[in-house]
Structures are given as structure tokens and as C-alpha cells.
Image: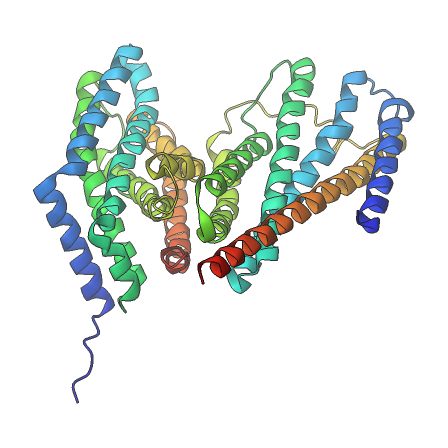
Amino acid sequence: MNKKLVFFALVTLGLLLYALNQALYVAPTEETMGDIQRIFYYHVPSAFVAFACFFANLVASLVYLKQRSSAADAFALATAEVGVVFCTIVLITGPLWAKPVWGIWWTWDARLTSTLLLWLIYVSYLILRRFSSGGQTPVLAAVLSVFGSVDVVFVYMSIRWFRTQHPQPVLGGGEGSGLHPAMAHALLANVVAFFAFGALLVWLRYKLERSRQQLDELHALAAERGTN
Amino acid sequence: MPTAVHPTFIHTLLSNLWKDLCLEWRSKDAINAMLFFALLVAVIFSFAFEPTPEEARQMVGGLVWVAVLFASIVALNQSWARELRNQALDGYRVSRASPNALFLGKAIGNFIFVGALELVIAPLFIVFFNLRALGSTAMLIVVFAAGTWAVVINGTFFGAMSLRTRSRELMLPLLLFPISIPAVLAMVNATTAVLTGEGGTRLPLDFLIVYDIVFTTVCFLLFETVLHAE
């Protein structure tokens, strides 16, 4: 087992435990929302990690299209999968928080809907990877990632312009409303811990994919030797 | 010394387009299936909803675009499946002809097929929902042209991509629909604005035109990569 990986995993575990304590016990209870507001410390960091993963996926896809390196492809796959997982957490914790606070599960607000569409695009990316065969998968996936990223801009603008008749969120729970210092600290601790957790997952998934790629190469090589 | 014949971009494009139109004219594979599918969607929608004329104006914009989007999948799948017969696509790949000429030829061909579908399906919706537009009908033609191009340009591109996957007929809508959602939102918005005569068509139409330009450019930049993916 890789020593660096074990060390990083232990650091991540420590950070997560510290952040959990901060979020559940140390941070003060919000005046109007009560304890339900604590979901904020998981919702927002997950969103940050998901967006960072999708951005990393775009960069890796562009590098792949330019250099055709299998390492870039493995990284693109790892970030897409982890990004979808964290984006799913965002989409589940969002309505759970919205229902008691806003009284509705869902609103066609630009941020919510963009996140949903981003999730849809990256799920289609994973399905494409699953359904395409052989050496074409990385190219097709990288191309779709570029399309998805261009689309994100249109998604955001279209929802802002064409869905404005719907109620806007009243309680932001954070942005612009000014956080209590202890809340800001708990949020920061969770953001750091979640980023470490996300990076750990991407690292593990990347290693797994690299091993799979090498195994495929060895199989191909063995098959070639066998026929000669 | 005779030089090798090197067809120009426009020549390759037109011969591709002409070939697709001839094939479709003789076989009528895509257009028949597409028309019947769209008819079924229109009938099912009219059974499922029973709106007053005012409600109809509010909702038909959405229904008609859903019908067009679903039905166009049939044409888009057919258009590339055709190239697999006799390894036509492999022949094209090893030739010196421009990949983008092939792509644009196909996209224009699909635009014509889906446009023909809309000419049939629009009267159907007018009849079934007793529709009378309160805004400018001429504007509707511009909206439909811009919206159809948005569906067709990405659809043609993803059709070429899903050709390389297992269960390719299923793959196309899974790739196309998520990317098309913002365009669909704009199309529906513009169409509803024309039908109800309320709200401007300017913003959604501008949005669609920008969407068309951006995605046409992206398709042009990446089509060669997809065609030669191996």
C-alpha cells in the first residue's frame, strides 16, 4: 500500500471528524431555521467539490484531446464519477433543507436548476463511457465533456431569463446574509475536509483506472505474443 | 503531369446532401417513421390534455417542441446508420474529402427532413387544439428555423458519436436531450410568446441564434476528432 495515500487518508479522516464536531456541536444554532440549518455545512462543501471535479474533468478532457495520454483519461473518468457522487449529495440535501425552510421541495431557481442539468449532463457522460467500446471511449467522452461545459453557460443564462416568474429563494442561509464567525469557521472546516475527501476519492479511483488500463495493455500484449 | 482530383468543400458538401436527399426520397425510411411517430405523439397529447383555447395557447408551445424533439431522433439515427452499409463511412474516412463537408451536408439534410416534419405536425396541433395564434405568425417561422437548427446540429453530431457505441439508437437521446435543454427552454418560450401574444420573442430568439452559432462552431472544431476516433 502506498504510504503517501495512507497518510493522506488518515489526514482526511481527522479533518472530517474535526469538521463534523464543528458543524454539529460547536457552530451556534441558527435563529429562525434551528438545527435544520446545519445541513448547510454538508450541502455547500459538496457543491464546491462537485463543481471543482467537473472543472477538473474539463481540463483533463482538453489535455486528453491534445496529448492523447491515458493518464489524462483516467483522471477525467475519476473526476467525473466523484463529481456525480457529490452533485447527487447536493441535489438530495437541497430539497431536504428547502422543504422545512421554504415550504417547498424545489424551485426553478438558476442555481438549483443549473446544478440539476449539470448532473444530467455528467450522468450522460458516464453512460456514454459505459456504452462505448474499446479505444474510442476516451475520445468520445472528452468531446462530450467539452460540449457539456459549453452548455453550462447556456443552461445558467436560459434559466435566469426564461424561468424568472418562479419564486426566488428568500433565505439564502449564507451568501450575503453575513455568517456568524463560528458558523463561518465550521463551514470553512467542512469545505477543507470535503475537498480532502473528494481528492482522496479521485486519487483512489484514478489509481484503480490506471491499473485497469495497464492490465488491458498487458492482455493485449499477451494476446499478440500468443498469436505470433 | 495530371494532378489528383481534389474536390472542393462546397462540392463535397453538396454531393453529400444530394445523396442523402436522393436516398431518403427513394426509401422514405426516416420521413415515414418520423411522421407517424409525430402523429402518434400529437394524438396522445390531445387525449391526455383537454385545454380551453386560452390554456392551449399556453401549453402547445411546449408540446409541439417535445413532439419535434422526440420525432427528430428517428431521422437523426437513420441518417448515420445509412453510412454503415458497404462501409461507406470507412471509405469516407480514408479519403481526402473534408470531414466537415460530410457533417454539414448531413446537418442540412436533417434540417430539411425535420423541417418537413414540422410543416405536417404544426397543422395537426392547430386542428387538435383549435389553436389561433395571437402574435405574429411570420415570427413563428423564424423561431422554428432557429430551434430546428439547434436540435439538428447537435443531433447530427451526437448521432455520429452514438454510432460508435453499443445500442446506438438508444444512446442518441441520452446524449442529445441534456445538452439541448437550454435551447428547448428558449424555443418553448419564444413559441409561447407568439401564440399568446404576450412577452417578447426577441430575447429567446437571440439566445437561440447565439446557441446555434456557438454549437455549430464547436461541432465544426470537434467533428474530425469524432470521425477519426479509434
Q: Is residue A41 left or right of residue B108?
A: right
Where residue A225 sits: x, y (%)?
Answer: 50, 61
On the question of residue A32 being in view, the answer is: no
| Position above or below: B95 against B44 | below
Question: At 24% across and 54% down in the image, what residue appears?
Answer: B87
Q: Is residue A183 left or right of residue A105?
A: right
Q: Quadrant of the C terminus of chain B?
A: bottom left
Query: Viewer-proximal residue, A205 or A173?
Result: A205
What's the colour scheme? rainbow
Question: At 71% across and 41% down in the image, what residue appears?
Answer: A201
Query: Viewer-proximal residue, B174 or A158?
Result: B174
The image quadrant of residue A54 is top right
The single residue placed furthest to the right in the displayed view is: A26
| Position above or below: B11 against B60 | below
Q: Is residue A52 left or right of residue A161?
A: right
Question: At 35% across and 39% down in the image, what residue appears?
Answer: B168
The single residue placed furthest to the bottom in the displayed view is: B1
Where residue A109 sits: x, y (%)?
Answer: 57, 29
Where residue A14 sits: x, y (%)?
Answer: 88, 36
Q: Quadrant of the N terminus of chain B?
A: bottom left
The image quadrant of residue B175 is top left
The single residue placed furthest to the left in the displayed view is: B26
On the question of residue B71 being in view, the answer is: yes
- How many marks are shown on the rendered structure? 0
Where residue A179 sits: x, y (%)?
Answer: 82, 32
The image quadrant of residue B170 is top left
Query: Viewer-proximal residue, A70 or B194?
Result: A70
